[in-house]
Amino acid sequence: MSRRVTLNLGFEGHLQPVTVVIPDDEPTPWQWGERFEIVGKPTPRVDGALKATGAARYTYDISLPGMLYGAILRSPYPHARIKSVDLSRARRLSGVRAAIRMDDTVARFAGQEVAAVAAIDYETALDALRLIKVEYEELPFVVDLDMAMMPGAVSVFENGSNVQRPTVNEHGDIKRGLAAAAAVHEAVYATPVQTHVSLEVHGSVAEWDGDELTVWSSSQGIFTVRDDLAVYFSLPHNKVRVITEYLGGGFGSKFGAKPETVIAARLAREARAPVKVMLTREGEHLATGNRPDSLQKVRLGADRGGKLTAIELVQHGSGGIGAGSGSAGPFLSLYHSPNLRTEETNVFMNTGPSSPMRAPGWPQGCFALELAMDELARKLSLDRLEFRRLNNSNPVRALEFDIGAKLFGWKEKSAAPKSSGPFKRGIGVASAAWHALGVSGPQAQVIAYRDGRVQVVIGTQDIGTGTRTILAMVAAEELGVELARIECQIGDTGYPFSVPSGGSMTTPSTTPAVRQACAHLKEKLLRLAAPVLGAEPSDLEARGGTIRVRFDPSRKMSFEDVCRRIPGDSLSAEGERVPNYEGYRKDQAGCQFAEVEVDTELGIVRVLKVVAVHDAGQIIDPLTARSQVNGGVLMGVGYALFETRRMDPQLGIMVNPTMDDYKLVGPLDVPEIDVRFVEVANGFNNTGVMGFGEPAHVATAAAIGCAVYDAIGVPVRSLPMTPDRVLAAMETKA
Amino acid sequence: MKHDEHKPPNSRSISRRSFIKGAGALAAASGLVRTPGADAGAATSSGAQEGIVERLGPDAQTIELKINGEVRRVTVEPRETLLRALRDHLNLTGTKLVCDRGACGACTVHLDGKPVTSCMILAIDARGHEITTIEKIRIKGDKTGLFGAFVEHDGAQCGFCTPGMVMSLAAALASNPKANLEDVKRAVAGNICRCGTYPHVFAAALSVARDTRGGGAGES
């Protein structure tokens, strides 16, 4: 059962009618130029006061009667056989209630979980860890990407090469493309390992009731945690419940049940008491994931007119004992070239496993490609923005270049003479792309109560993007009521299914389900009101807190009056996120401009200004949207200038697993940030929403890298651009 | 640019880099370099009377802490931090544990009105001081307008750094109600936010300061 609707798709000045087929019970998609009462207006988040006052309850804040505190013993060695683990002395310590060892017989990175204990307080648990006797047989190791790739390198996994099979993408003929080029640029670019540093560390509180397990987890995917635990403990899904009321950041590191969650549940089972395991900051840096590093050999060729004839990437990167270090995304999608080849190779080494991190692979690829673009533009004596315009792959980005350049003052800043003193300014621009259209799967329930309250119930979680607020706004809009009437229940696998908060997919995946549920609820409410108003339900609309006759709005009932007629206590309806329709464009564009000032004597880079212009579908809340882009930009500033996991090559351990030695962007590093959205009617779902948490982070470090090149006249081809690297690059010039 | 006038181009004389390197060595040698937080440490070493070394521990013992105007008895080991005492023993979980070594500001409380990181103070050393946590500010109502401003300007994303930010700013605005953008940045310089919410935190604080200034002149 389906119907056809015609939607105006595209963007300002480029709209065209497109007929799409949608299921019968799907509400008519919001249209370009739709007039909203709530959606699209800057709205403070509904749980803002709870967060500001410390009343929001995070996993770390959960306290249950009789709850024990867990702690984890980690391997001090990057590679070792675990010959024996003696828990007996730990078990005998007063106050200790459980002690377990992990199943692994080999530790492959310093920080791998070896054993764990639960005790009546945290200090006792730490004492108990010191009493665990582990016999290790140290093995040779490798913690450096270059060394891990060498022939004859120590194997991270038995009988296997560290260098995995490459992933190749190719079209045209790269050799011919390079031969046809008027100018070719070739260089190697390097990016560091970045760790997520969620402020709330990973952790869980686990409680058993017979064979039923309840887990409060600091997770961005409650259903994946549930599924993992069900598999681990051989339980049916309905015996495992996972709750994440509030979440102190995740950035991709908090999908699924990680070791600490399994450990909490195992300790709780052994102790017959609830157990809380929250990691130390060191454990968080070592074992919960990271963005892989990269070495990217880039070759670009262009003809005399500035058209790219060849794009080539040969990339290696290490996700430690994990995979997924590829960085080809930007090479495949930002710029056109008739000849293109990318080769991505993951390399194992004895460091903690990678996990997805805000636009996995993209910031590293974008940095290499965009700095290479600037180096080639210089050879061709082309304006760098013009060079990008010539090769740009997306019409929305063309508009974004114009908007950004004007806001940023690209022309004026380009023309400004360089200072002759030690402080040099520079500007840069870089492109972003993403594909956050959302997925089907989420389901929502919406309940109206006799007292006029409305509840939205959906098993999603708020990673910090304002999910409760956004869903409440969509519900209020659809039901024509004020925001305060809506209460959102999220973060519990007892609620209808939703997808993890990742891939910038939460809002485009959940809002259509909530809207459909509200549309179904509205039908029921209109049927209640119809006889009172003496009209057909189809002639009624819900708007302005009333149910009213569309052609005669003076005939109306308040929403509360309608709710009073609900038989029983409440009226409920369900909705689901249907598969994406055939929409406009599957790729989202964006671009960012950066201005830096480089202290050429001290090598210190300061970012002065960033202009971020991004595609968005229907923006639900411009206020929280801007927060997200600010966050993406600032994480990019840190990636460009400060952040790096440093390994000691002799000991194989991370030397900066703290927040004083691993440098994040602080308040004094914040540049002026100007955020602009270009609304694109994409037509993939009923709210027209697209996500942008990730694209906002893709281009920042690249734009800063290009700006530094502009400032000092030599490229710094390795991130982070710390003072030593800036000075070293300048030495090569002199 | 102003800096440029001080020095001719391509000068090979003393650069600021070599000057700072030299000055740093000199300062260290003359004992000018002090450990951050040394003052806070001195202020908290109460409990012992002059001339008498107080022996505590290693076992837990019951101490009294004055928290949010109320005397609370709590049984802690001498090695436990004020932060652990607040969170694990008194269930005052608004104060957050993030770095556990004074590097991020998430555990900021007020000790005698001054912002301190509670992960760097032992619970026993907080005896005899007025301890104020985010809960007090919550219960006493929003006199400063700071909470409202945080909500209005979206000063929180995941929200885990937010109570610490609020505590730092509450202290700063109490001592300097007319703070400007630079003052605000300095006030939260030790508060780290991974979500990158800083611009909206600045806006929230400035809106309060601006109200105090009577709608005065405008940083953005």
Image (tube, helix red, strand yellow):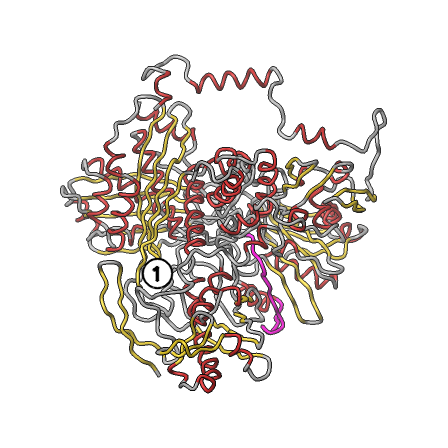
What residue is disc 1 on?
A: A617
Residue A234 within the magenta-colored segment of the rendering:
yes
**Residue A565 percent location from the top left of the image:** 54, 82
- Above or below: residue B79 compared with residue A222: above
Q: Is residue A580 left or right of residue A649?
A: left
Which is nearer the eye, A177 or A82?
Answer: A177
Q: Is residue A258 left or right of residue A620?
A: right
Count residues near mark 1 (Cα–Cα under 10 Å), then give few for <14, some for 14-19, many for 20+.
many
Q: Quadrant of residue A32?
A: bottom left
Q: Is residue A326 visible?
A: yes
Which secondary structure lies at badge 1? loop
Query: What is the quadrant of the N terminus of chain A in the image?
Result: bottom left
| Residue at image coords 54%, 54% | A48
Q: Is residue A232 left or right of residue A188?
A: right
- Above or below: residue A388 compared with residue B217: below
Q: Residue type at mark 1? A: Gly
Query: What is the quadrant of the C terminus of chain A in the image?
Result: top left
**Residue B80 percent location from the top left of the image:** 74, 42
Q: Quadrant of residue A495?
A: bottom right
**Residue B195 percent location from the top left of the image:** 49, 48
Chain at numbered mark 1: A
Residue A702 within the magenta-colored segment of the rendering:
no
Q: Is residue A329 visible?
A: no
- What is the residue that sits farthest to the top in this orientation? B13
Magenta residues (range) = A233-248
**Residue B4 percent location from the top left of the image:** 35, 20
